[in-house]
Each structure stands twice: as C-alpha cells, then as structure tokens.
Amino acid sequence: MKRISALIIGAGQAGLAMSHHLSARSVPNVILERGEVANSWKTERWDSLRLLTPNWQSRLPGHAYAGDDPDGFMSVAQTAKFLDTYAATITAPIETRTTVTRVRRIGDDYEVETNRGLWSCRNIVLASGACNRASIPQFSTGIPESIDQLSPLAYRNPSQLRPGGVLVVGASATGVQLAAELRAAGHDVMLAAGHHVRMPRFYRGRDIQWWMDRSGLLSTTVAEVDDLQRARAVPSLQLVGEASTRFLDLNTLQSAGVEIVGRFTGLRDRTALFSGGLANATALSDLKMNRALDGFDAWAAEAGLTDLPAPERFAPTKVAEAPRLSLDLARGRISTILWATGFRPDFDWLHLPVFDHKSRLAHEGGVVARGLYVLGLPFLRKRNSTLIDGVGADAAALADHLVSTNVRHAA
Amino acid sequence: MNVQSNVTVNNGVNTEALIGARGAFAEAPQAAQFTFRSSCSWIEGTYSANKINSYFGLGQEHERKRTFSIESDHPEVFAAADRAPTPPEIALAALASCLTGGVAAVAQHRGIQLRSVQSTVEGDIDVQGILGMDPEIRSGFSSIRVSFEIDADASKDEIAALVAQSQKRSAMFDILTNPTNVNVSLA
C-alpha cells in the first residue's frame, strides 16, 4: 500500500489547480486520473464545442491564456492542450490510467482502492467533475425502441444520427447548441424547453462574461444568495462560444425552423407529453435577462463607465400561439431523442455516509468531512466555481482549510 | 432577490411562517406530504354538491371548523337548470384564485405593497369533444387565457415578475399544464 498526505481524484482544471496549491503549501500530493490529463475534455465532449468563456478568462493559478486572441473561444482540443501545458508547467505528480474503485474510511485515514493498487491518505480532494453522467428522466425507459436515445456525453456530430427528426430535450447551452447544429445539418428538430436562461453573447460592446466578471456577479459567494439550492440548479446560459453569435435563444432557433415545445413531462403510452407552461418559462427567462442587464447598467453607471454604447433591451421571446402538447412517438417524425437535461457527478465509488436524501454529495463550501474535499461543483463557494477561472480560488481556500485542519489534528 | 425588509408591506400573507415551514419540511420531508379531498353527491340531473372539510398533512388528519360546499350544474343551453357553475368554470376559478394567492405571497416576500389585483380567466372548449362527435377534438380546454390587472408599488417588470413567479409555483397552473395520473375506481 502506498501512502501520501493528499490524494486528488481527477486531473482536470480542478485537480491540477489543487495540486498546484497543495504543492505550494508543501503538502505531498498525487493526482489519480482514470484516463489522461483533461480526460473528459478529450473523450466526452462534442466536436463543435467551444468554451463559453473568452480566452482572457482562462486563468488558473500560475497559468493563463497568453495567445494573441484574448477575445476568442477555445475549442475542446485547445482546452485540452491548455490543461496539458498547465500539468507540465506545475509538474503535477499524476498517476494516469488509474481508476478509483472504492474509498473507505479507516480510522483517521482514507483507504483508496484503484485498478492499480491501494493507497492510504489523510486527505482526499474530489476533483472528478460535475458532469460525469447525463441526468436523464426515469420515463425515458418507456420510449419506443424504434427511437435512438443519446446523451451529450456520447454525441459528437450530426453524422452520428440516423436521418429523420430529432427531439432535443433541454434548453440550456447544450440543448440550444445541439438543436442549432442538427437543424443546420438538415434535420427536422423539435426542442422541448423548460426553465432556461436567455442572455446575449455581447452587450454594449463587451462580452457578457466581461460584464459578469467586472461587475462582481461571478464572484458572488454562497453567503450572498438567499436560496443556495436554487442558485446551484440554475441552468447554463443560452450561449455559444462564438463572438459573432449574439443570441442562440429560442427566437434564433425558431427562425431556423426549430419547433419549440414545453418541458417534456412524461409519456402516456407511446405519446410524449409536453407542458403547457412554455409561455411562462420564456417570460421568466426574459425577465431574468432584463434584471441581469439592469444590474449591469446600474453597475456601469456607478463605476462611471461612460465610454460604453447606450443600454438596449431586446424583443421578448416569441412563443407559438398554441405550442404542441403531445407527439405520438410511433408516427415516425422523430428518430432520435437527445437528452440535454443536465449532468451530475459520479461518486458511486465513494462508500461514505456523505450524501443527502436526494443522493447529492453534502458539503459546506467544498468541505465534505474531515480530510475530504470537493471541487468544481455548481456554486460550490462562488458563482464561478465551475469555471476554469473560478476553480483556482476555491482550490486555494480548500488547500488552506486542509493545511490548518491537519496542523490542528497533529497538535 | 429584492427582499426589502426596511419597507413595511402588508398584503395579509404571513411569509415568515411559510419560510419557516420550508425549513421544517427540509428537516422532515414526510410532514410535507398532504392529501386533499372533496366528497361529491349527485342531487339531480347534472346538479351535484361537493362537501370539503378534512385533509391530511403534517403527518395527521385535520378537521376544519366548518365544511365548505361547492355546487355544480350546467346552463340552460345544455338542457339543464343552471343552478350553479359548470365544473370547467370551477376549474378556471380555481386557477385564478391560485395565481392570485401566489401573486400576494410573492409580493409580500419581495416587499411589494399591492393595492388591487383583478383577473379574468377564459377557457375555450369545442363541445363536439364532450359530445363525442369527433375523436380529434379533446373534451377539455383547448386553451386558457388569464389576464391580470395589478395596481402595486412596483415597476412594470417587477409586477410582471410577480405574475410569472406565481405561475411557476402555482398548484393549479401545474395541474392544468402538466399531465397527472388519475385513477377512478368503484368502491
């Protein structure tokens, strides 16, 4: 059995940032990685995906984008390379091709079983990501077998799909991007939209991420929101990493010929049922966007930023007069259902009593239990906890916590 | 969230109690399981009367101080005596009341004083469905429209947000917009 002070599980941006901060605090650490550095980026993302954050925002502790296109958006391959470079720069001790199969508590230590042997450690940092599994509704098991079902983790490009119609379920960044791509490839596309967040890519001459970053919205802490559960469940903004595409919203998709329906609520026999509440979902989204823009305008005025173009407001989301409420799935219009219904982390190998009644990992700002930490989950400590730009500060805070707890425990 | 605790707002809604209930239910989700019921008796023709009193919640049965009654009938054009509203009209009324209560609760929580809240609900039904004349036509409403007129100490967008948030949390809005498994049995 090998022994180390801290084991980090996962060599993505979170694990690498944590290794950097632990090494800087002289805490011996090793990263266990099931594949290679940036594994999810290399194996579980679709071909056309680009980061939703501009290059200037790719800032990790000790490493930042230094190319000549700060306002561009990295492709998946460029993101993987960015992380490979980071791993080499910080000379992180990484055991690749090492899958953790079980974590148990033995006295004051953790015993970590992998496909390449046993480890013992005092501290564990879970940095395996927030998007290991696609969250797909239970009723999907009742979908007729004639229809292919696909998650964004398995989707690569439109050539994977059979000819015929596609029902994309979900209207966050993933859903709207894939609906647009499949429509452009010639498919008949229907998009089922529940609650979603509409946002322009750029506003008053600046990227929306500039507004969120500079106004302080992204550094909002868990203590500053009044309903943390809700804040953690907010879907990703309807954005695409492409500077010229101002909106990839339901209006854009409808103009491209995508049929918008309400939330996919269930099946009655072989008929898909969609909510009649679509108009309110779009109204809430428009109001939310306008409140965000109001907030940015107020911040800009207070900060005395007078050289910006004037504020503007956008036409509301159009909704068909009578959106479709049902679709007979046996009639052949749809050959594929793409579930863009969100993701969740996979902690099946974590055999510890650290989950809440909904099987979610319970934590306080990333502290799960003594010596057990998690990084990279939605709104872990701040609104930007899931961003490459936000994980560094979270890692620093948890590294400090780890060091002070270990010192106290040893004393 | 624009909770303006410095402003004294009274819409007659005890939001502190409701927020307290949220905390209690988070600790004991079983207590949040409620069952509502109504007992209906046929009187004559399409005329019937519901008695509403007991319900289950917070882990036990509750008896109210009084029993409520809701009667229903059909209008004369359906060859009935028109002694009470039709069941679909009661459903529309239930939606309006649910949304209105929601507006008041959300306004209270957001520190918005209401002066008046008026609404009109309309539902369209093609009665060929009820009469079984065309299987393509459903029996229920093909569409429902609710129109609110609200006078309150708030901007137009804030008032729109009250109405939108009320829909998001409304039981009747959910009941009418999403499918529900309904089982009818013979005792």
Image (cartoon, rainbow, N blue to C red):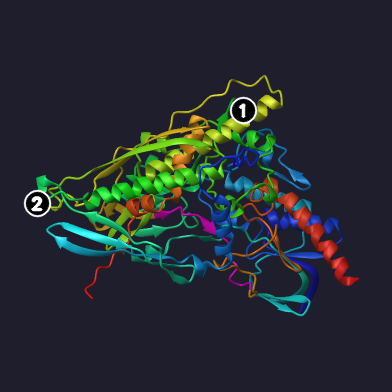
Q: Quadrant of the C terminus of chain A?
A: bottom right
**How crowded is the residue under tag 2: few (<14 C-alpha within 10 Å), some, or many (20+)?**
few
Magenta stretch: helix, strand or loop mostly: loop
Q: Residue at x 83, y 58 (%)?
A: A23
Q: Position of residue A230 (x, y in %)?
A: 56, 52
Judging depth in this view, the residue of A256 and A313 nearest the camera is A313
Q: Is residue B147 above or below residue A193?
A: above
User: How many marks can you see?
Assistant: 2
Q: Quadrant of residue A297?
A: top right
Q: Quadrant of residue A307?
A: top right
Instruction: Give yes or no for contact between labels 1 and 2 (Cβ–Cβ under 8 Å).
Output: no
Q: Chain of mark 1?
A: A
Q: Quadrant of residue A119?
A: bottom right
Q: Position of residue B19 (x, y in %)?
A: 57, 54
A276 left or right of A225 in image: left
Q: Is residue A234 above or below residue B37?
A: above
Q: Is residue A126 visible?
A: yes
Amino acid type at mark 1: Asp
Q: Position of residue A406 (x, y in %)?
A: 84, 67
Judging depth in this view, the residue of A10 and A302 nearest the camera is A302
Q: Chain of mark 2?
A: B
- Outermost residue to the right: A411
Q: Which residue is mark 2?
A: B133
Secondary structure beneath label 1: helix
Secondary structure beneath label 2: loop
Q: Which residue is mark 1?
A: A297
Label annotation for residue A78: none
**How crowded is the residue under tag 1: few (<14 C-alpha within 10 Å), some, or many (20+)?**
some
- Outermost residue to the front: B65
Q: Is residue B30 magenta?
A: no
Span of residues in magenta: A338-350
